[in-house]
Image: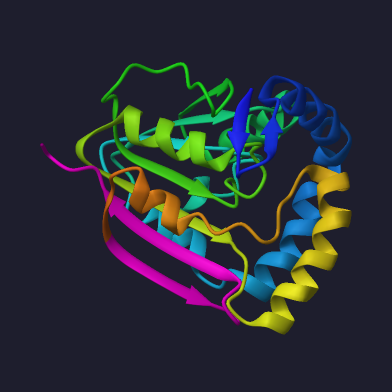
Amino acid sequence: MIWQGEYDVIDVARENERLRHLWKEYAPRYDSDMVRLERMLLDDGRAWACGQAKGDVLEVAVGSGRNMEFYPDGISVTGIDLSPEMLDLARSRAAELGREVALREGDAHAMPFEDDTFDTVVCTLGLCSVPDHRVVIGEMYRVLRPGGRLVLLDHVGSHIRLVRWWQRTLEKAMLRQCGDHQTRRPFPLVKQAGFLIEHRDRRKLGVVERVAARKPLA
């Protein structure tokens, strides 16, 4: 169990089992739903995120592999996801694109990698749906090599009150459908984890956030 906030306790193992069941049902329609969402919110976000990847790359919550076409040549990509059904979609996409990607099922709260393994960690639309994003960000820090880069693209809680109210209303339905939080703000947790911030911007009325940061060399 992991403490979240002052009063709530998250049973990560139990929540992961619930999410596996939800994604088993949702996976077949995920890509069709994402087409509309990406058109409204992401613009060139995937290309921006993947274009910064270098060396040995880990993509956390790789999902159906929608980032694969944007990664540059000459890098090694490993993807991890909780859902075997989503990983099946990612394998099919990799085969269609002719890309070699190492895909494995795993829990982002306790990643099956040694410390200081990757040069880049990428996560797009993933921190919104893990049970405890604080722990996952800590794991991202752990598996990055000193000087390695973290790249995040996600929808977050807006700084505009009316928009945030709408997000809270939507959140109830999305948590039931696929465990998707609408009002999280991971940026402070990235700083608290020890990353050095290189870039941050918020778009679309504060709903979309892009972050690039580095693990210190020392």
Q: Tell me where residue 35 sits by quadrant.
A: bottom right
Q: Tell me where residue 85 sits by quadrant.
A: top right
Up/down of 171 relative to 97, above or below: below
Residue positioned 85% across, 28% down in the render: 21
Pick the quarter of the image with the N terminus: top right
Up/down of 41 relative to 7, above or below: below
- Please indicate, yes or no, whether residue 71 appears anywhere in the rendered image: no
Spot occupied by residue 50 in the image (x, y as percentages of width and height): 41, 53
Q: Tell me where residue 176 sits by quadrant.
A: top right
Viewed as shown, does residue 87 lie left or right of 118?
right
Viewed as shown, does residue 215 lie left or right of 106?
left
- Please indicate, yes or no, whether residue 187 appears anywhere in the rendered image: yes
Residue positioned 58% across, 38% down in the render: 61
Pick the quarter of the image with the C terminus: top left
Up/down of 50 relative to 121, above or below: below
Q: Outermost residue toward the left?
A: 218
Specify start and end residues of the magenta stretch as a single range.
198-218
Q: Outermost residue toward the front?
A: 7
Spot occupied by residue 205 in the image (x, y as percentages of width and height): 60, 82
Spot occupied by residue 87 in the image (x, y as percentages of width and height): 66, 29
Viewed as shown, does residue 68 lie left or right of 93?
left
